[in-house]
Image: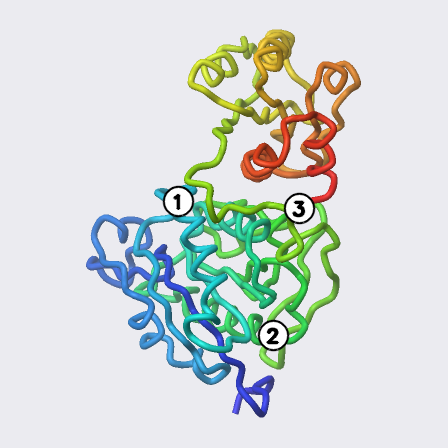
Amino acid sequence: MPVDQPQARPRIAVIGAGGTISTRSALGSLDMVNYMAFGSTLNVEEVLDAVPEAAHYADIAPIRFSAASSTSVSYPDWRALVQRINTFERDHGKVDGFVVLHGTGTLEETAYFLHLCLKTDKPVVMTGSQRPLSAVSSDAPLNLVNAVRVAGSPDARGMGVLVCLNDEIHAARDVTKGATSRLHTFRTPDFGILGEVNGDGVNFYRRPIRRSYPATEFGIDHLEQLPRVDIAYSYAGEDGAAVRAFAAAGAKGIVIAGFPGGRLSPAQKEACIEALNEGIAIAISTRAGSGRAHVAHDLTGSGMVAADNLTCQKARILLSLALTVSHEQSALQRIFSLY
């Protein structure tokens, strides 16, 4: 019997949303590159059949959701996933937690969106893999098993959405994918992991304090789409063309992945002020990969908001949701300070 198996096993819903963790290559066990083009994506029942060890830790309820690559994920998928999780107990009975199998390309973005929009009070754990299920030394089986263990842990409640890969537990707000193919790809640069999954149990060492589901102010049930928000990158010689192009395309908000510290080129700053005058919200992040955007007074005085230490891709999600609440600078800044 596994060491941390409780007397009464938790009931965990495992949602199949595609990705490498659900993929088998037709090219054999040494293929770790071309499996998406020359392989097949298994449904969640087939994945669970391939990893029977997960059933040692929980009574598992499989839920089919998607077989898509994570690079195709967008707001309609996120909204549908939120609704599926929120209504599961109403339609299928009591559950103690959820695991979402997902591609790693946008896993951190899906995790943060769920983190902000779910209304369930149960733990939600996202996992994926760097190597397909068919690969020699695949990380898919243990990542799935460990995610089920975390979702069934009483200590996982109230943590927001968790991301579990490579024996580590991360907060959805803070984690990012930092390597293309290494197993140790998901990292939390500023604060480190929340805990780890070992052979003898699930162990947490700290808790995140920023607000997360279900105590959030964002309601998406009746939103067919979110306000358009784009990301403009800062680089030497940037002339503001990207900001002006996004404004012309109908952006309601733009996140700037600014120079470390949250600075802009003179031309980019000028373009941002033009966008602000057109009613477009501007949030300043940083391209550095960690650390807060220390936005100078000349930028905040112009109406821009600081995205704190969120990566630009997560700042985009929060700004999109924030714009469904308010367009006022003070309200937007409050939201970035709270979440």
Q: Are marks 3 and 2 in contact (CB under 8 Å)?
A: no
Q: Quadrant of residue 96?
A: bottom right
Which residue position is annotated with label 1?
A: 76
Image position, residue 119 (x, y; %): 57, 58
Q: Amino acid at mark 2?
A: Asn
Nearer-N-terminus badge (3/2): 3
Q: Establish if 127 lies above or below 313.
A: below
Nearer-N-terminus badge (1/2): 1
Q: Quadrant of residue 67?
A: bottom left
Q: Within 10 angstroms of label 3, few (less than 14), some, or many (20 or more) residues?
A: some
Q: Within 10 angstroms of label 1, few (less than 14), some, or many (20 or more) residues?
A: few
The residues tagged by marks 1 and 3 sit, at their Cα atoms, a distance apart of 30 Å
Q: Establish if 305 lies above or below 209.
A: above
The residues tagged by marks 1 and 2 sit, at their Cα atoms, a distance apart of 36 Å
Nearer to us in this view, 29 or 269: 269
Label 3's element?
A: loop
The residues tagged by marks 3 and 2 sit, at their Cα atoms, a distance apart of 22 Å
Which residue position is annotated with label 2?
A: 198
Please state if 134 lies on the left or on the right of 236 as rendered: left
Please state if 317 lies on the left or on the right of 133 as rendered: right
Q: Amino acid at mark 1?
A: Pro
Which residue position is annotated with label 3?
A: 189
Q: Within 10 angstroms of label 2, few (less than 14), some, or many (20 or more) residues?
A: few
